[in-house]
Image (cartoon, rainbow, N blue to C red):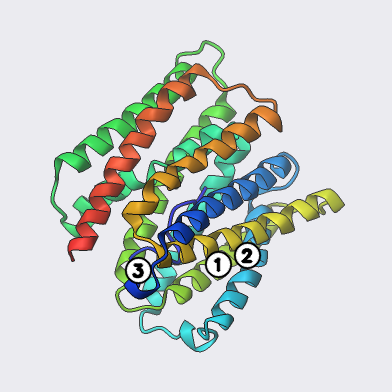
Amino acid sequence: MVTRPSICCEGSRVNKASEKPSVGIALRILSGFLFAGMSICIKAMSAEIPVGEIVFFRSAFALIPLVVFLWLRKEFPHGLATRRPLWHLLRSSLGAAAMFASFASIARLPLAEATLLSYLSPTFTSIAGVLLLSERVTIWRVGGVLLGLTGVVVLVWPEIGHRDLDGDRLWGYVFGLLMGILTACALIMVRSLSRTENPGAIAFYFVIASMLGGIATIPFGWVMPDSYGLMMLILAGLLGGFAHIAMTLAFRHAEASLLAPFEYLAIIWPVIADTLLFDTPLSLAFLTALPLVLAGAAMAAFEGRRHWKKR
């Protein structure tokens, strides 16, 4: 699940004249709540509707608030002009693939566990920064990676060591890890693109690529949703679109370092949803892995933000 500032706000800078920390914090909490609502909708219909169809509807209906937002900011359509179309294509393809992997993970795992795996993206981004951008290896990077990966081992180990191995659940972990890797690669691309490209254009082309990726899965079998399924599909898209807008506005009002603690509070909503809506108890492995993964994500994210603040 893509809950990170990966589409509109990565690499953005706060205008000190318009900085309103309390507004930024409120918007960041709101975006986490909206992303959780989107994930709940996806989880609720994942057993009946194929992942590709969900990706299409989620992207198509997210496009509506995004276009309205860009139009109100006078960035549509001229703000979509680009000098780097191939880079947009690569970034958008990586982001779309991450969305497919995220939704496949949500379909196979408890929502809280699938969400926790999404917090691995800063850890993988830190690794990608060293391998692809020749960034320095620091104690923060190493510590974040070790904590994050230890958390994954703690989460997955009981399933691997179980005599009656649940293959579908194991695939959920695989898709969750793949989502983190793909999101990290997409974030690296966003960092590069944000130096010359309008953030609105980065978001727009990502949504279009995800829609096309969803359409490409029609030959593999789509289903006609009933009224409840259609409502969930539409709601997932609208919630996802408004969540990204809220996140973008949050980073315009407050520094990333101030908002970081509230980013990790978003795990509360999937935990509540699993307990109250999906009647899924929290496992001991999840409760043990939770602080490890979040601590690793926090360390990796702090190092990344400190690096980009210096530039």
Closer to the eye: label 1 or 3: 3
The amino acid type of the residue labelled 1 equals Val
- Dot label at residue 207: 1
Q: Considering only order in the chain, which callout, 3 or 1, is on the residue closer to the N terminus?
A: 3
- Dot label at residue 62: 2
- The structure residue drawn at horizontal position 43% and vertical position 39%, both measured from the top left corner, is 177
Q: What percent of the width, then of the height, locates residue 26?
A: 51, 55
Closer to the eye: label 3 or 2: 3
Q: What percent of the width, then of the height, locates residue 23?
A: 48, 61
Q: CA distance from mark 3 to mark 2?
A: 25 Å
What is the quadrant of the C terminus in the image? bottom left
Q: Nearer the viewer, residue 269 or 236?
A: 269
- Dot label at residue 14: 3
Q: For residue 238, what is the image quadrant?
A: bottom right
Q: Considering only order in the chain, which callout, 2 or 1, is on the residue closer to the N terminus?
A: 2
Q: What percent of the width, then of the height, locates residue 187?
A: 36, 58
The amino acid type of the residue labelled 2 equals Ala
Q: What percent of the width, then of the height, locates residue 66?
A: 58, 71
Q: Nearer the viewer, residue 268 or 187?
A: 268
The amino acid type of the residue labelled 3 equals Val
Q: Nearer the viewer, residue 82 or 253?
A: 253
Q: Considering only order in the chain, which callout, 2 or 3, is on the residue closer to the N terminus?
A: 3
Q: CA distance from mark 1 to mark 3?
A: 25 Å
Check whether the beta carbons of the residues at disc 1 and disc 2 lie within 8 A of each other.
Answer: yes
Helix, strand or loop at disc 2?
helix
Q: Nearer the viewer, residue 188 or 138?
A: 138
Q: Is residue 175 visible?
A: no
Pick out the residue farthest to the top: 163
